[in-house]
Amino acid sequence: MPDVREPEGPAEAARMSEVDVHPGVHRATEPDEEQVLRELYGEPDEDGIFRGKGA
Amino acid sequence: MGDASGMLAAARAALGMSGVPNAITLDYAGRHGEEFRKAAWCDMAVTYWARKSGNEAAVLPGGDRAYTVWHAQDFQKIGRWYPGTVANVNRAEPGDIVFFDWGRSDSIGAIDHVGVVEKVLGGGRVQTIEGNTGNAVKRRVRSADVIAGYGRPAYKPYKWNGKAPSGEPELKRGDTGDRVRDLQSALLKAGERLPEYGVDGDFGAETEAAVRSFQSKHPDEVDRVTGRYGPQTAAALARALGHAAPDKPKPPAAKAPPWPGRYLKQPPIMRGDDVRRWQAQMRKRGWRLTVDGAYGPRSEQVCRAFQEEKGLAVDGVVGPVTWRQAWEAPIT
């Protein structure tokens, strides 16, 4: 386990290929996601973002 | 800000941000190196929201993070890590930092993505805000199946100030944060019920039902039962709690009776009908005081508090002015 206080910079940059890799990162993983978000926030905008009235 | 609602407000403000480089990656690259300009940015987003909302210490216990595994380990090291079991996910709170492993491993080493919990949906599910999901900041619904665990930032603890919150801007379903907590606390104090979720800072169906219930009981003060919390409902709720609405102080109850001609004070304890009369009036105004005709330490305490509230000379003695104000000053 790396020391959490070690200087990030290059050491952390070397790890970035391990972040946001799985396909699940970029897609819905719950079949009713759109329905749930629509109930909470109304219709999404043209880019598919559920902003809600207050956002 | 420095609390969960501030963290979530910062995340909401970024909804729809997309592509790289963007404000989030450029901010991180400015402190940690150009190689982050176009790197995977989910955790850079969490770092950015934490810094924007004054939550660095709570959300980033090991400092800025772009690598999700290290960020999760930061929480583990300070004892604020909760594995992604269904039971734990149901106990998550808005503002928690949620990490994903996708394979039901609940292993920190397998984490490659992170977001912030906006709502806890029950059934082992949360609704999140995530950076770099579909290359944008979006709301998602995630279940314990894909959650490795979450970190619980040590946000500033919430404490209710005992008052109904302002009705402007209006609070409604979908709102979250400390104003909602204030409303929920005030509704409970006013006798409404929040049996399932309690004071959770999330204006959901239960809070809406409680607002409707309260509104339906105050038809003289609230025009319509809407389930939304605006200025009329705020004024009614303030009055129900024994506080005058800020814009409409209660009129004085009556003209003061003549001052009895002696100063009520202690020690020694003074007794008499004049004391009893003053105590009864103070109780009528909402002060907790036994009406026993004896002016003792508690009577003096109430007197001092009342004098301070009304901007009078604070001496704990009921003289002509304090006597008169007990009847004629607005109840606030």
Image (spheres, coloured by chain):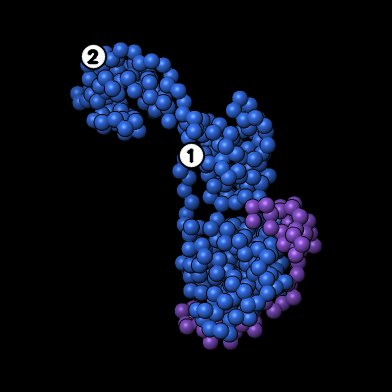
Residue B25 appears in view: yes
Residue farthest toward the left in the current orientation of the protein: B268
Q: Observer-nearest residue: B211 or B220? A: B220
Could you tell me which secondary element the residue under label 2 belongs to? loop
Q: Which chain carries label 1?
A: B
- Which residue position is annotated with label 1? B163
Give the residue drawn at x 71%, y 56%: B123
Asked where in the image residue B293 lies, by quadrant, the reply is top left
Going by the numbered disc 1, the residue's amino acid type is Lys
For marks 2 and 1 on the same chain, the one whose residue lies earlier in the sequence: 1
- Which residue position is annotated with label 2? B261
Chain with colour purple in the figure: A
Give the residue drawn at x 61%, y 25%: B220
Percent position of residue B244, x then y: 47, 31
Residue B76 appears in view: no
Percent position of residue B234, x then y: 55, 36
Going by the numbered disc 2, the residue's amino acid type is Gly
Q: Residues within 10 Å of mark 2 (few under 14, many from 20)?
A: few
